[in-house]
Image (cartoon, rainbow, N blue to C red):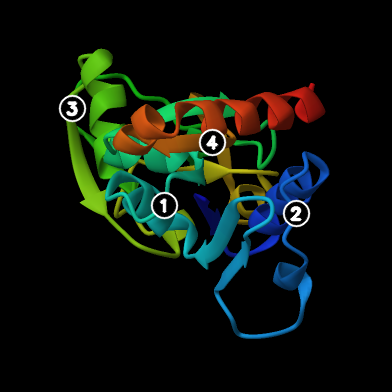
């Protein structure tokens, strides 16, 4: 049995459809209920819904053999998992945004508001730029307007929210998409089963 952690929401449903087409269907998952765990013994697969930011924890700790996780989570938390493939969906990017016309002259410490603290520190360390990180969990777009921060680092999909708050993207930190990840021990003991699944899923994506 392969245990699969899927992120709750549209992304998880979209990825499940790919797994279903690849021959790993579990019809009960599409029934209207509050259940979180579904299995198809015949196909040797068990799915469960978890909060998107928790998928990597379930996989890293071995409660799930594989899971679907955004590249942003992998970059921020660096979980001890194998990244098996890019699922080429849930595409967006981690970006630096600032008020229109902002220019960083590099003469003083840059104030950066973000909830992605680790990814932000790494990005600016590579640029040898001194920063002051202000950790925020929501409404991050107002930080530059209120003078709390010079720039923000956040996930950008369409950029509409930025525009509505008079901000614009000034740098892309890294592209984001959904990735299939595996528990290291599971991959060792269920290599054939997991590789077969990956092969069928990636064939559909290509």
Distance of label 2 from label 4 (alpha carbons): 17 Å
Q: Is residue 179 left or right of residue 9?
A: left
Residue 139: x and y, percent? 45, 64
* Label whose residue precedes the other's in the sequence (2 or 3): 2
* Residue farthest toward the top in the current orientation of the protein: 127
> Which mark's residue is nearer the viewer, 4 or 3?
4
For label 2, the SS is: loop
- Seen in the picture, residue 107 relative to 13 is either above or below; the reply is above
> Which mark's residue is nearer the viewer, 4 or 1?
1
* Residue farthest toward the front in the current orientation of the protein: 42
Q: Is residue 178 left or right of residue 171?
A: right
Q: Residue beneath label 3, please?
A: 108
Q: Is residue 180 visible?
A: yes
Residue 126: x and y, percent? 26, 14
- Seen in the picture, residue 155 relative to 42 is either above or below; the reply is above
For label 4, the SS is: strand
Q: Residue beneath label 1, please?
A: 64
Snapshot quadrant of residue 156: top right
Residue 118: x and y, percent? 25, 38
Distance of label 4 from label 3 (alpha carbons): 40 Å
Q: Is residue 71 visible?
A: no
Q: Give me the disc on residue 180.
A: 4
The residue closer to the viewer here, 92 or 159, is: 92
> Which mark's residue is nearer the viewer, 2 or 4?
2
Q: Is residue 181 left or right of residue 59?
A: right
């Amino acid at each position: 049995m392969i245990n699969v952690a899927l992120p709750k929401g549209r992304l998880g449903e979209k990825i499940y459809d790919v797994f279903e087409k690849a021959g790993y269907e579990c019809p009960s998952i599409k029934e209207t209920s509050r259940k979180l765990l579904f299995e198809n013994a015949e196909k040797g697969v068990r799915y469960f819904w978890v909060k998107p930011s928790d998928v990597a924890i379930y996989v890293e700790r071995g409660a799930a053999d594989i899971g679907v996780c955004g590249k942003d989570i992998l970059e921020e938390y660096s979980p001890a998992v194998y990244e098996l493939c890019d699922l080429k969906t849930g595409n967006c990017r981690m970006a630096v945004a600032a008020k229109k016309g902002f220019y960083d002259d590099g003469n003083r410490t840059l104030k950066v508001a973000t909830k992605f603290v680790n990814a932000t520190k790494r990005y600016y360390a590579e640029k040898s730029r001194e920063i002051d990180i202000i950790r925020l969990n929501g409404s991050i777009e107002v930080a530059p307007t209120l003078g709390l921060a010079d720039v923000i680092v956040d996930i950008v999909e369409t950029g509409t929210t930025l525009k509505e708050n008079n901000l614009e993207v000034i740098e892309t930190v890294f592209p984001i998409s959904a990735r299939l990840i595996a528990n290291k021990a599971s991959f060792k003991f269920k290599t054939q089963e997991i590789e077969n699944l990956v092969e069928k899923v990636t064939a559909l994506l290509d």
